Image: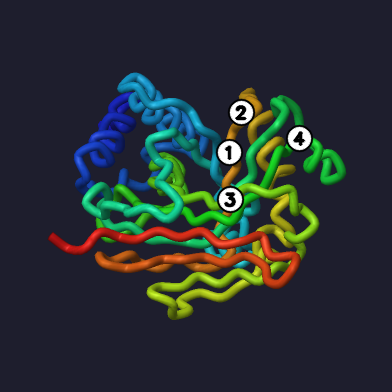
Amino acid sequence: MSPSIAEAAAVLDGAAHGIRAVEQFAPGQFTLAQAYEIQRASIQRRIARGERMKGIKLGFTSRAKMVQMGVDSLIWGLLTDAMVEEDGGSVDLARYIHPRVEPEVCFVTRRVIDAPLTALEAADYLEAVAPAMEIIDSRFANFKFDLVNVVADNCSSAGLVVGSWSRRFDGLTNAGVRMQFDGRDVQIGSTAAILGHPLRAVVQASRLLHDARMSLPAGSLIMAGGATAAEALRPDLFVECHVGSGAAALGAVGFHTAAAA
């Protein structure tokens, strides 16, 4: 017998809270729509423990990833305040199962988003943008999952680190992205990998929220999606991401991982 929505949410929340991997739900047990119900039910368990909603994250913003997974639309997950790590601070990997990191940009909203936006409208709904990195951490064993399972698992949302805010939206067009471990390049890419331009992620987020009959309050975060592939984290690293260069640079964001016990 397949687990109920509530039971599946409890399994995934327990895996995240208990820092232990679980097996995927069997193919065909849930539809994609039910996966989003599981996602929201799982986050509600976190809210019940005292966490607060912080925003949303987008996944599959790379066309290549969409083709790889055989989908034609984005996926998205929910962010809470407990997922936010400090820029320049120390990240305790013991909080995660098998964490990876990817470079992104993050927006903060200045107006409630409660209807689909056009590309021309998107920037008017944003207060600022910042370089960011997302720590992803599947609750499934060996970081293996299919589309329905990753959506149910809140699109592998686990942590995020956000740098200094600016109003330099014009610097997002094909800006260079460089992620480094201890000063060595591990991923190099461009903001153009995020739907051609990161502001398009805001447009897509508005449509996804509308379809889900949800709104995003002012002051919420929107993580626009990975600009490159993710890299596995290990203890005793300094991880840094630079977005843009020269006068148009968006800036840098970084964190240390704690040394192994």
At label 3, which amino acid type do we have? Ser
Callout 2 amino acid: Ala
Q: Amino acid at mark 4?
A: Tyr
Reading the chain from its start, which is encountered first: label 2 or label 1?
2
Q: Secondary structure at mark 4?
A: helix
Q: Are marks 4 and 1 in contact (CB under 8 Å)?
A: no
Report which residue position mark 3 lands on: 164
Q: Whole-percent x and y of residue 242? A: 57, 67
Q: Name the mark nearer the viewer: 2 or 3.
A: 3
**Which of the two discs, 2 and 1, sits closer to the camera?**
1
The alpha-carbon separation of the residues under discs 4 and 1 comes to 12 Å
- Asked which quadrant contains residue 250, the reply is bottom right
Q: Tell me which numbered mark, 4 or 3, is placed earlier along the sequence.
A: 4
Give the structural element (helix, strand or loop) at label 2: loop
Q: Which residue is mark 4?
A: 125
Question: Which label lies toward us, 4 or 2?
Answer: 4
Question: Which of the two discs, 1 and 3, labels the residue nearer the N terminus?
Answer: 3
First-in-chain label (4 vs 1): 4
The residue under label 2 is: 212
Give coordinates of residue 60: x percent, y percent.
57, 55
- Amino acid at dot 1: Leu
Please name whichever residue, 62 or 149, is drawn nearer the observer in this view of the structure.
62
**SS state under label 3:** loop
Q: Earlier in the sequence, mark 4 or mark 2?
A: 4
Q: From mark 2 to mark 1, how far is it between C-alphas?
A: 18 Å
Residue 152 visible in the displayed image = yes
Q: Residue furthest top?
A: 48
Q: Residue at x 25, y 37 (%)?
A: 17
Query: Which of 162/231 is in front?
Result: 162
Percent position of residue 109, x then y = 67, 35
Q: In terms of sequence position, does the residue under pointer 2 or pointer 3 come before the other? A: 3
